[in-house]
Amino acid sequence: MAFLARIFRFVFWMLIVSWSVAILRRIVRNMGRGVSPGSAKNSSMDIPSDAVSRKLVRDPMCGMHIAEGLALPVKQGSEVLHFCSAECRDRYLSKSQKLAANA
C-alpha cells in the first residue's frame, strides 16, 4: 500500500512540475512578443481604441443599437446617421434616392 501511495505522489508532483513549466514557457514567450498573457486573444481583432465608447446609436434601417465608434456614419444635410453594416447603409441610401426621384 505504501508503494502505491509513493507512485501516486510521484505522478502528482510530476504533473504539477510539468504544468508549471508549461505556464512559465507561455509567459516567457508572450513577454518576448510584448503581449501580456491576458490580451493574447484580443490582439488579432482590428478594433480602433476609440471604438469602445459609452454612447450607443441606433441604426435607422434595422433598429440595432451599436457603439458610436463602431458604426458607419453617413451625413445627410445637417444630420448624421449611423449604420450597423454596409448593407443597412446601402439599403437606406437606395431607398432615400427612390423617394427623391418620385418627389
Image (cartoon, rainbow, N blue to C red):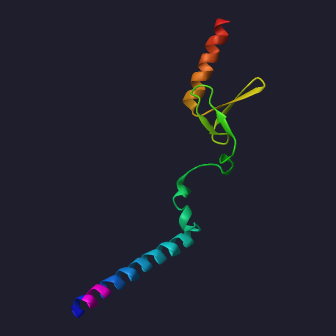
- At x 56% / y 62%, what residue is drawn? 39
In the displayed structure, would residue 86 be above or below residue 95? below
Residue extending farthest right: 78
- Name the foreground residue: 92 vs 55: 55
In the displayed structure, would residue 88 be above or below residue 101? below
Quadrant position of residue 19: bottom left
Residue range of the region highlighted in magenta in the rendering = 5-9
Query: In x, y percent, where is residue 46?
Result: 58, 49
The image quadrant where one finds the C terminus is top right
Query: In x, y percent, where is residue 89?
Result: 60, 27
- At x 64% / y 6%, what residue is drawn? 102
- At x 61% / y 35%, what residue is drawn? 65
- At x 64% / y 17%, what residue is drawn? 96
Q: Is residue 102 left or right of residue 7?
A: right
Would you say residue 7 sits in the magenta stretch?
yes
Residue extending farthest front: 1
For the image, the number of numbered tags is 0
Quadrant position of residue 86: top right
The image quadrant where one finds the N terminus is bottom left
Q: Is residue 2 left or right of residue 70?
A: left
Query: In x, y percent, where is residue 24?
Result: 48, 77
Query: In x, y percent, where is residue 54?
Result: 69, 45
Residue extending farthest top: 103
Would you say residue 62 sits in the magenta stretch?
no
In the displayed structure, would residue 44 be above or below residue 51? below
Q: Main secondary structure of the magenta part?
A: helix
Residue extending farthest left: 1
- Name the foreground residue: 84 vs 35: 84
